[in-house]
Structures are given as C-alpha cells and as structure tokens.
Image (spheres, rainbow, N blue to C red):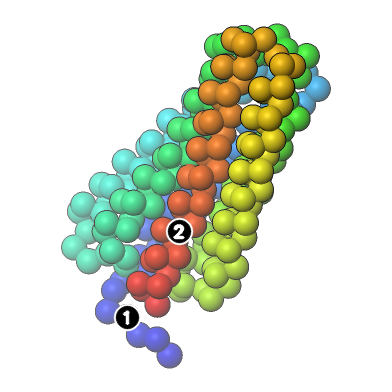
Amino acid sequence: MRFSLKPQDDAFYGFFNEAAENLKRGVTVLAELGDDKPDFQSISERLVDVEHENDELTHRLFNKVNTTFVTPMDRQDMYLLAGKFDDVIDEIEAAANLIYLYGLSDLPSLPREMIEQIAVLEAQAALTAEAMPQLKGLDPAMRDYWVECNRLENDGDRAYRMLLVRLYSGEYEALTVMKLKEVADMLEGACDAFEHVANVIESIYVKES
C-alpha cells in the first residue's frame, strides 16, 4: 500500500476534471464547423463563452493553490497543467473566431483535412476528459492516456501536412490560402497543446507515484 503525507483534497482534482469537461464541450462546439450549414457566428460566440469559463476555473484554482498550505500535488505542476488547458481553449477559440472574421464561411465548405484536424481534437478532448478523474490516486491506467494522446497528435500532424499540400496546390486564391493556413496553424497548436497536457500529466504521475 502506498502512503502519502500530502492531503487528497478533492477540490484540486475537481478543478482539473471540470476544466477537461469544459475543453470537451468547447471542441464539441468547434466540431459544428463540419456540419452541412454551420452557424459560424454562433460557434465563435459560444467558444468565447467557453474560454471565459475556463479563465474563471483557472483563477479559482490559482486562488486555492495560493491559499492552501499543503497541496496534493506540486504547486508548479498545477500552475503548469492549468496553463496547458488554457493553451488548448485559446487556440480553438481563436481558430473559430478567425474563420468567422475572415469570411471563410463564404467558402462552399472548409477543407476536408481541416475537418480531420478537428476530429483529432475531438478524440483528444474525449480522451483527456475520460482520463482526468484518474489523476487522483494515480491510476496506472493513465499510462494508456498519454500514449494514445501522443498518437493522436501524430494523426493531427498528418492531417496538417496534407492540408498544406492542398493549400499550395493552386486550388485556392492566395489570400484564402493565407487565411486558411493561419486557422490550420491554430488547430495544429491546439493538437500540440493537448499533447503538452498529457506530457504534464505523465510528469506528475512519475513524480508523485
């Protein structure tokens, strides 16, 4: 049996569980971009709301960390993990916002490879939300989480590279290529940020177990 002098304060774990579910909700909204007739403005506005809710969660977590004498995990690890969650939601909120502001809604549809990027984000978000409750108690099953999250990030890389090939094929006008490339970079950044979340979780697991 493993003993620990650190308290198992459910509130800290609850913050990360809630943040993971919030990210999952945000990516679900983002995935509406693949619908037949997406409401680009609504998607953008709702993701702004999700981003604000994540900011509130982060502030609550930081306040609790700063006012708690002994925390169940290293304080810097908790700051870092919260920051990586922020990175994910910032990237997907910005991507949806630019699609709307750049007028990319006027295209017949977004490139299939961009929708594949979003599908990878959906899988990463679902995986993260499923794994986060295992952080308390450091369930050995968490090893599968960061391995799979890294594999999904590789899928995202492949979709991104194929999108670049399409963008530079001459199918789109130069200005549209620039706009789509900027959005694709943000989606790629979100995929990377999910991998960074997994890497922080792995580091916490190794350190605390």
> In the rendered image, which residue does mark 1 sit on?
4
Q: Which is more N-terminal, label 2 or label 1?
A: 1
Q: What is the quadrant of the C terminus in the image?
A: bottom left
Residue 23 at what x, y percent from top left?
53, 42
Which residue of the protein is positioned furthest toward the right in this rendering?
36
Which three-letter amino acid code belongs to the residue tagged 1? Ser
Judge by depth and name the residue closer to the eye, 129 or 53: 129
Pointer 1 local density, CA inside 10 Å: few below 14, some 14–19, many at least 20: few
Residue where numbered disc 2 is placed = 199
Q: Residue at x 58, y 56 (%)?
A: 149
Relative to 168, does residue 79 appear above or below in the rendering? below
Q: Residues within 10 Å of mark 2 (few under 14, many from 20)?
A: some
Q: Position of residue 174 (x, y in %)?
A: 62, 11
Label 2: element kind: helix
Q: Residue at x 28, y 47 (%)?
A: 62
Q: Does 86 appear above or below 165? A: below
Residue 2, image x and y in percent?
40, 86
**From the viewer's perspective, is the residue at label 1 or at label 2 nearer?**
2
Report whether 110 appears left or right of 57: right
The dot on residue 151 is none
Based on the displayed image, in which of its 4 quarters is residue 144 positioned?
bottom right
Determine the residue positioned at 31% across, 71% down.
7
Q: Please identify the quarter of the rendering in which residue 28 is found.
A: top right
Residue 50 spot, x, y in % from top left: 50, 32
Q: Residue at x 32, y 80 (%)?
A: 4
- Residue 86 appears in the picture as rendered: yes
Outermost residue on the front side: it is 169
Lateral position of residue 165 relative to residue 18, left or right = right
Question: Of residues 150 and 201, which is closer to you in this image?
Answer: 150
Task: Measure how far apart labels 1 and 2 are at the Cα level.
Answer: 23 Å
